[in-house]
Amino acid sequence: MHRIKTFNTISPLGLERFPKDHFEVGPEVENPDAILLRSQKLDASILTDQLRAIARAGAGTNNVPVADCTQHGVVVFNTPGANANAVKELVLCGMLLASRGIVPGIAFANEQSPGSDYAELSKLMEAEKKRFKGSEIAGKTLGVVGLGAIGSLVAEMAISLGMKVQGYDPALSVAAAWRLPSQVKRIENLSSLAATSDFISLHLPVLDSTRGLINADFFGAMREGTSLLNFARDEIVDTGALLAALDAGRLHRYVCDFPRPEFAGRENVIAMPHIGASTQEAEENCAVMAVDQLTDFFLNGNIKNSVNFPALFLDRAIDAAPGTRLAISNRNVPKMLGQILSILADQNINVIDMLNKSRDDIAYNLIDLESTPSDSALQAISDIEDVIKVTVL
């Protein structure tokens, strides 16, 4: 029985997908084999010899000690793309809020006295509506920074609304490139994108290379009157440079999902309370994806959408007996696989299929055997220097 401890509220639509005869799931589970969470902040104290996986029902994993997990052989999963549509729709809302006087217009209408005469109120609205005049987004240019699951959806949406779209992503994968609409113009540097966009939408993770990426140089290159949308991560934008650009009038409006004290009272900032993925559908999609990934990992050893381990999938033979698949994680150093196979050969255990992949400093192996390995064979493999975890499936 695999023990899954949950934090936060995980959609029942996802939790009910765990096979009940193989998994015990809930917030009260002790000594878990895996943790399933949304926003709960974890530290290295949760790492035990028992723990094999952590699944984040969402894209970001900044609340998980990923580096420590890797050292302990704990696979960290996320759910990229599961909340992409929810974020995409909020980006559209953000562009409309930035281009039209919607927020101040609503505030003005709500300021009127409940006892006002309807005819007088209508006359006042007609007289004052020019204060909230805006512009349409059709025909404008949207610059998308980061063309992954969300960025590509945003680009596609903008094209369907009659916008011109250009994108910047130096780490664009082949899979992401195939998803990208052909109408998107690839831009080779951020300065060029800033200088030629009416709206700029950020869709990047927080990495050393992206923290503070939107800085004074970026704002200096920006076309005056541009609106910036950030539904990715707060740390991507240099707050000091942002405020200076707003004060100088170079940046027309900043729409984001990350309120800060510095934004209070600013009419040129629209800050939302981190609601980009806060839809019932997104929470269900994330839960379903996370549960399916954990299930396949514990039953078959397969890894999909891990942020610290290589992706790896090995079909099981239809007639394979339980207990004849090994999942082995080790540090990515030479001669590891040879040592493992040598021990199996010495024990007269025949290998019928295997797959080995590495990612940075970690390697992962799935090995299908003709017979169940003995305890002595498993111990010998575990005793190899740089082997981190050995699991029989």
Image (cartoon, rainbow, N blue to C red):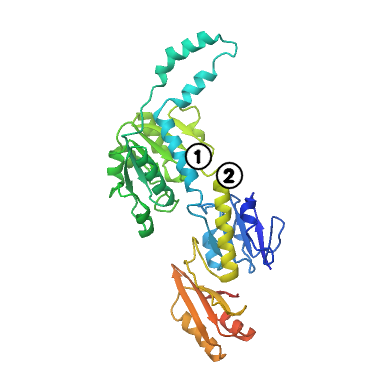
Q: Residue type at mark 1?
A: Phe
Which residue is drawn at the image coordinates 51% and 66% (left, top)? 303
- Quadrant of the image occupied by residue 198: top left
Q: Which residue is mark 1?
A: 258
Residue 184 horizontal/vertical position (percent): 31, 47
Residue indicated by mark 2: 280
Q: Quadrant of the N terminus?
A: bottom right
Q: Please state the horizontal and vertical placement of residue 131, each as a whole percent of the image.
A: 41, 18
Instruction: Report, in whole angstroms, how far the alpha carbon at label 2 lies from the one at label 1.
Output: 20 Å
Residue 60 placement (x, y as % from top left) = 51, 52
Mark 2 is on which residue type?
Gln
Q: Residue placed at 47% from the left, 14% from the top?
A: 125
Mark 2 crowdedness (10 Å alpha carbons): few <14, some 14-19, many ≥20: few
Is residue 354 visible in this depiction of the protein?
yes
**Vertical position of residue 254 compared to residue 169: above or below:** above
Which secondary structure lies at badge 1? Answer: loop
**Is disc 2 in contact with disc 1, using a CB cutoff of under 8 Å?**
no
Does the rendering let one see residue 385?
Answer: no
Q: Height in image: 99 above or below 185?
A: above
* Comes first in the chain, label 2 or label 1: 1
Say the numbered circle drawn on residue 391. Answer: none
